[in-house]
Image (cartoon, helix red, strand yellow):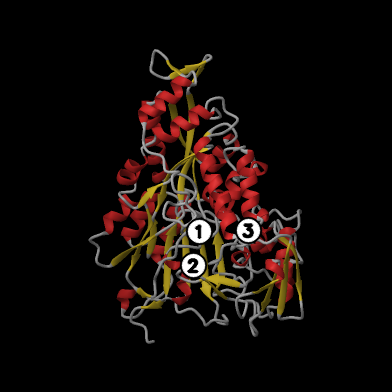
Amino acid sequence: MTARSIRGAAAATMAGALAVTAAACSNPGGTAAGAGGPKDSAVVGIAYEPETLSPLLGYGKDGNSKIFDGLLAFDGEMRLKPALALALPRISDGGLTYTYTLREGVTFSDGVPFTAKDVVFTYRTILDPKTNNPSRTELDALKSVEAVGDDTVVFRLKYPYAPFAERTVHAIAPEHVAAKQDVNTGAFTTKPIGTGPYVLSDWSKGEKLSFKANPTYWNGAPRVKKFTMAIIKDDDVRATRLRAGDLDAAILPPNLAAGFEKDKAKKTYAAKTYDYRTVTLPTHHTVTGDTAVRRALDIAVDRQTMVDKILEGAGKPAYGPVPTDSEWFAKGTERRHDLAGARKILDEAGWKPGPDGIRVKNGVRATFPLWYLSGDKLRQDHALAYASDAKKAGIEIKTQGGTWEVIEPRMKTDAVLAGGGSPGDPDFDQYLLLNSALAGDGFNNMAWYDNKAVDKALEDGRRTNDAVKRHAAYSTVQRELVKNPGYTFLTHIDHLYVVNDNWDGLSTQIEPHDHGLASGPWWNVEAWSPKGATK
């Protein structure tokens, strides 16, 4: 679960949603498709907004930021390709040195040339402990970064870190602007300048992010001239506004996306993801911190029914952060639904049914609260189904909806229906999710999970580029989660997007949890071509 994606959701209010969609309806920002010409603007409805727009604080770390570029980027198949770099890096010194040659003639949107010093500034600033970047540990392997002239950057690592090249999709900030401000509070955090295909024209927090095409973009000016992301937290409101014509596209849960199947003017795009829903089981709660309770819940839950009923088949059961169809998944760690087995575990651990059927041990009732984000129907439905399954085993779960401002202070002791997941390398998500040293660090390790074997495996996995050793390390992590699950992983979710059929060039990537903002069919909006436009 990334701090960026979760905290961003907190600012998305219903009032903001209604305001922006009303504005979008009155003037969505371009020639309407039905007004005799091609449409050159798009308004899309997403659930979350970023906390910041500064790459120095974590924005754009996984690419697709629209305002910025990284040295590299991902294509539609999630393969690395050059962006600000002229080619993929030259790797030497046993995997400890990465050398990038930069593309010539690139400028920031204010006209100032992009050079190697901007890359050095970005990475050095992120690594500075004074910078409030929640993802700094993702660059733990980086020892130094230096410029060789204006067109070459050399990264040196402390240890061979296999996925380092994927870390260089990180957005690059302009030194000439950001270095003159407070990195954590300066104007650059909300009024950024980058090299990307779009320029931020307005950010009404809780309502919308508006972009205009960068006419001097190094890879060609986008055909979609105006692009607006409407921040609409509530799933039902997004669907309603899409149907009313206020939005050109929206991310929707399966049951709401199904309502547009007969609309010939719209297309539905399904993206495979690493996005999971999970229940945190806080170590610091008497009930959820008990290993027997954790193990019982892990097999009491009926994951397949959640996929069938809640996701309507748009997903698959989750047994950990790694999807079952990933090359990194540890075969044999699947958990079958076994209510009788769950009851047996609890019986043997001394959790005996009380008069009302709820189990008790040493005077402690097997009950705990479970929070979910208000307005997120998928999370609510997962929470209710989980509570229903748990009750059959004799565990009482009290579900409650709330904003992240309400939920965050309670995370040390209260369970949360959370989300997370990152494609690519297993280090990307698992280190932040499970490392005991990160317990209580914002939204990292929300369950305060503490397992020394997992800690060691996580370090082993990130400190070698030997494929066999890495697979062994992440298999260990997954098998330890069977023995002592600090989270109950429920489902991996396919993302569904309903889009007006006005453009060519749409596609989807394999997506992270942080959907809608940098992902969705608009991950490459700069490459869209309005239907009816002259090629």
Q: Earlier in the sequence, mark 3 or mark 2?
A: 3
Position in image of residue 447 (x %, y %): 57, 38
For the residue labelled by badge 2, is the local secondary structure a helix, a strand or a loop?
loop
Name the one closer to the observer, 3 or 291: 291
Instruction: Find the distance from the CA under tag 3 to the CA under tag 2.
Output: 20 Å
Q: Is residue 58 above or below residue 377?
A: below
The Cα–Cα distance between marks 1 and 2, rounded to whole angstroms, is 9 Å
- Left or right of 507: which side holds 426? right
Coordinates of residue 59 in the picture (x, y in percent): 60, 60
Label of residue 58 in the image: 3
Please tell me which residue is depicted at 62% across the width and 77% down the height of the picture.
85
The count of marks equals: 3
- Mark drawn on residue 78: 2
**Disc 2 marks which amino acid?**
Met
Number of the front mark, 3 or 2: 2
Q: Residues within 10 Å of mark 2 (few under 14, many from 20)?
A: few
Query: Disc 1 marks which residue?
Result: 423
Q: Are marks 1 and 2 in contact (CB under 8 Å)?
A: yes
